[in-house]
Structure formats: C-alpha cells, structure tokens
Amino acid sequence: MQNVTIKDIAKRLGISASTVSRALRGSTEINEETKRLVQELAKELNYTPNPIALSLKEKKTKVIGVIVPEIANYFCSAVIAGIEDFAYNKGYHVVIFQSHEKYQRELMNIKLLESRRIDGLIISVSNETKNGNHIQELIDKGIPVVMFDRICNEVDTPRVVTDDKGGAYMATRHLIEQGYTRIAHMTMSPQLSVTKNRTNGYTEALKEYNIPYQKKWVVACDFDIKHIKSSIHKLFKSTPKPNAILASAERIAIRSIEVLKEMKLRIPADVAVAGFFDNPISRFIDPPLTSIHQPTFDIGQSAARLLIEMIEGNTLQHQFKTIELKTTIEIRESSMRKK
C-alpha cells in the first residue's frame, strides 16, 4: 500500500500542502476548524510524517540539546525524563550533555551542540557560571533557549523555575514552629539564582518570627563530603550552636545527617535537618528527611513545551515568560520535635 502524503490530504480537502503541513504542526496561523479537518483526515488515512523529509524541507534537525550539571543528580535525571517524554511525542530527539558543575565544560558543550545544528537548547547552569553571556551569544545566532531551575536573570529567554523562595520560607517556618530558632542555612554557590531565592525565603521567615539573622550561620558549600563536614564542624564551634539546618540541596542535607551522626548528635532531638527537592530516597534514610518537593517531571515537560513552541514559530524568543511551579513541604521525622 502506498504511503499517504501531505499532498494527498491537501488534494482531498482542496487546500494547499503548506496549509496541511502547518495544520499538522498545530500552527497558530491556521484556524481551528481547518486543523480539525486536516487532523481527522490524516488519522482516517493513517498518515505518518516522514521525519527525514520534514527536517530537510524545514531545515530543521528535530534535535534538542540539553545541558545539566550532572545526570547522576536525581533532580536532573527526573527533569530530563519530562523533557524526553514531551519532546519524543512531538517528534524530537534529545541529546544530553553534562557540565559537571564546570563553566568551561558548559561552554564547550554549547559550542559542540551548536556545531551539530540543534534546533534549540534547554539548560540549567553550573555552579561556576557567573553570567549568561555564552547563552546570549547562542540566542543572538537564532537558536532558541529555555533555562530551568538555575537561571541567568540577565538573559531574556523563557525559563521554568519552582517557587524557591516560598519553599525555603515554608521549611524555615516549619522548623521555627517545631521549636527550632537557631537555624543554620547551608547553601550552594552564592551566585546561583536558586541560592539567592532560597536564602531570601529563609531570611523572610526569620524576620516574620523576630529571630535575628546570623550571618555566620549561612554557609556556602559544594557537594563534597569533606567540605560539608568542615562546614558543619565550623558551624557547631560557634556560640550558641545551631539547633537546625536548612540545606539548599538534598545531597547537602543527607550528607549533613551523616556528619551529625558521627558527631553523636541526635536528629531531631538535638538538631533538625530539612532539605530541598524531595528525592525518593529521602523517605528511606534514617531518620526520613523533611524536604521541599519540586515537581521535576513537570519542570521538564514545561521546558520542552516552551522550546518547541519557539522552534515551530508559535512563540518568539523575545516574548519570553517565566513559568513558576509550586513547591510543597513533605514533613518527616528529621524535623519533627513536636508530634
């Protein structure tokens, strides 16, 4: 049986092949009735688009690049799952690179993806990235970009984030309501957008409850266990000592629990711990970790949708918008002093 083509559908409906093509892509240039007629006939005739022919005709590769700090990070892998799910359903392939928290690696990845003629890029920047000049250069060359989670505010491009400030506020308020008033905040790199937003939420909650802000209790650290151990020992040499830790990342929170146990401190009797993201492992560690839940799969889906809308001409790059998804708090034993 001969394959049905766009021209066959166009001939049956008495419209141009280009109109059929745009209707099948869901273009906003085509009215809803025409889209309905085209899609119904395409389904009736078992029409299947030829991806190679489409990419040649439209000068598109149907490939999306994704750059994340680290695939082994469950947050990133869960976001990637959302990106891939949406992209594949729209006929796009996904190529994934890691920056390993290095700016130079991130820069190299962008140049490599550009040379492979990707249709667009989704990126969450590294710990070392201080500005978005390299990303803006890509946009200036006509390649659409969507940022997620860790963003560069100076780059005018769509972004998908969660309510980091609100999440940190919720976690800090919960700790205070459980009777913890000496709350240390262990953050990631200070220049990251998520660090700034989470620190703002933490300080806002302290202010609301008339608890003095202690600069010495806000400590930036990476994910290395030696660095985390050093930071915690330094915190607990201060007077008075903290009786709670809000970690800006779950890996910091989990490793903090390990260090606190080594120091013979009881959790939550002596020190409460709360983190960010809500990795499934959080409920299985001892004690189960209180965490701010971020909807990672939805982040990926939203980022892919925004990018594909730009690639297919339904949204212009300069018409950027921010999608902010809600965070929720999952309260577990690591912070429950009051039952």
Image: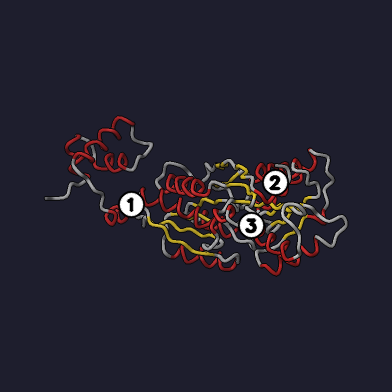
Q: Along the polypeptide, which appears first: circle 3 or circle 2? A: 3
Q: Position of residue 252 (x, y in %)?
A: 66, 59
Camera-side mark, 2 or 1: 2
Q: Position of residue 221 (x, y in %)?
A: 71, 62
Spatial CA distance of label 2 from label 1 is: 57 Å
Secondary structure at badge 3 equals loop
Q: Amino acid at mark 2?
A: Met
Q: Position of residue 213 (x, y in %)?
A: 82, 48
- Residue 63 is left or right of residue 14, and the answer is right
- Residue 158 is left or right of residue 273, and the answer is left
Task: Establish if 14 lies above or below 7.
Answer: above
Residue position marked by numbered label 1 in the rendering: 58
Q: Amino acid at mark 1?
A: Glu
Question: Which residue is located at x 32 percent, y 55 percent?
Answer: 55
Q: Position of residue 87 (x, y in %)?
A: 40, 51
Nearer the observer, 271 or 304 = 271
Q: Amino acid at mark 3?
A: Asp
Secondary structure at badge 1 equals helix
Residue position marked by numbered label 3 in the rendering: 286
Secondary structure at badge 2 equals loop
Spatial CA distance of label 3 from label 2 is: 13 Å
Residue position marked by numbered label 2 in the rendering: 336
Question: Which residue is located at x 74 percent, y 43 percent?
Answer: 178
- Residue 90 is left or right of residue 37, and the answer is right
Nearer the observer, 10 or 94 = 94
